[in-house]
Image (tube, grey):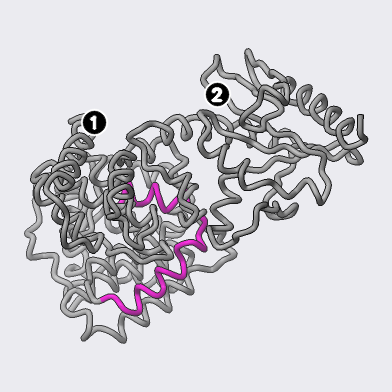
Amino acid sequence: MSDNRRQGNQAEKDVDAFLHRLLPGESAVVRIPEQDDCNHWDLQATFDHGTCVFGVQVKQLTPRNLAIKKAHLHDWNAAAIPTILIWRNDLSETAYWADPLRRQLRQGSRDTSKTLTFNENHDLKRIATDEEKSALVAWLRTRSRFWSMVRRPEAPGWPEDFEFPVALLNAIEDPTILRFLPVSRALLTLFEENGLKGNLTRAALSSAFLRAARQADSSPHTATRVLLKDCGITEVDPDTRTQIKHALIAWRKRVASDERVAVDNTLWAWDLIQSWTLPQRVPGPKFPLLRSRQTYPLGALVGLLPSDVLLEPLIQFVKVARDHKALQYAAWCLGALRAPESAELWKVAREARSVVLGRRDAIGKGWQLVDRQLLYTEAQLGGEEAEELYVKRLFCPKVAAFEAAYNWSYYDGDADVIRHRFEQRLDECRRSDAHVRKILTGIYRAIRPCISGEVPSPTAIDGSAWSGS
């Protein structure tokens, strides 16, 4: 037996023993004979009463073993269970793991070589401390749930699209989010087999499917026409058009009736995120008035993503967009970014507000609503001057009346929800509210009469009132 094979066998034994210690509850780790393995796994592990199953390829940690055959990566993407790579460093007796899918998405489809090399510093994660071990177990649970969902026939097929932005994997890996993005793989196959995909990547095509799916309930015919238009298709035979329509109808039928509003709002938020982040730009969604039913799923998505994924797109969007509703959403997202205070994003919000003030004529009548959102965002992100200015304005009767009407509209006039949200935020002292407690207190003071029955007039949401003029 060669030294490499002997070292490989020892690494498998070490990782086998390590997984037995790591996995919680009733777990099982089975070694797979090389001749019986079509997926290039050395081990297969199961835990959580059989609900979490994954394949493992084990390597000695050497520079040569960081290069993985792309043929193996392709097979892992098509496998029924997810795969994890684990390297063993004999010198330090430490194990490291990596996510093969994330590495492929980071690379994209530009590299034509037969192997993909993992970066020891960027791609590999150590498994030594209790925190690192817990993080791995949590990832295995999430990936198993994610994998079982995306391998279904009706799933989107993102794992096979190497143009999909790697950072968005953080969002779609979340089972709660993925459950609300049920796009048909059959529809994707139909487009590809009939040459309707054009130059669109699968990610861009999936975005078009999501937009069409939202319309399929009210008019499958219109949804089909819009989908073909979004994909740049002017002619298609009647049979294919009918198949597309039926696929969209089937998609809607799979969504439970009591989940359709949540699904539609999540689809809208996902569409917006993709329009800002995809390398191949796709048309963004239409922007409704800023409402909590839109911002809650949007906040859930933004909170799952690294801040640098959205920061630059948001800055650029503020510089060119003219729709005040679109700019309000961009300002709101800026405040929802997951970033440490040391990043001082409040300075970015202040600069964005300065840009908006300089573009008032281009934006039009609603520019004050954008100014209001950006001032709140600047305060939320730690801008002390912005907090002082906002609190000062709230003592103006016109601004207080404006805020009451604005927030009444934001929460769809639901007094119970308004009371619960404000009291919850003031009681819990959330990190995102740490710098705006005085502002929230002032707004709640202004809106309390509305909760008691004094419904504000919609005309009170006048942008000119925001400045107290």
* Residue 14 locus on image (x, y percent): 82, 27
Which residue: 86% across, 33% down?
A: 5
Instruction: Give the x, y percent position of residue 188.
Output: 32, 45
The 10 Å Cα crowd at callout 1, few under 14, some 14 to 19, many 20 or more, is few
Q: Nearer the viewer, residue 349 or 465?
A: 349
- Tell me the residue at 41%/73% (across/down): 315
| Mark 1, secondary structure of its residue | loop
- In the figure, is residue 378 to the left or right of 67? left
> Pointer 1 and pointer 2: residues touching (CB < 8 Å)?
no
* Residue 244 drawn above or below residue 134: below
Q: Relative to residue 80, is residue 312 depicted above or below?
A: below
Query: Residue at (54%, 68%) from the top-left corner?
Result: 344
Q: Is residue 432 above or below residue 187?
A: below
Q: Amino acid at mark 2?
A: Cys
Which residue is label 1 attached to? 254
Which amino acid type is marked by label 1? Arg
Category of crowding for the residue at label 2, using alpha-carbon neighbours closer than 10 angstroms: few (below 14), some (14–19), many (at least 20): many
**As drawn, 93 above or below 24:** below
Across and down, in percent, residue 12 comes to 79, 28
The image shows residue 170 at horizontal and vertical percentages of 49, 47
* Drawn side of residue 34 relative to residue 55, left or right: right
The span picked out in magenta is 295-321
Of helix, strand and loop, which mostly describes the magenta segment? helix
Looking at the image, residue 439 sits to the left or right of residue 264; the answer is right
The label number, if any, that marks residue 52 in the structure image: 2
Q: Secondary structure at mark 2?
A: strand
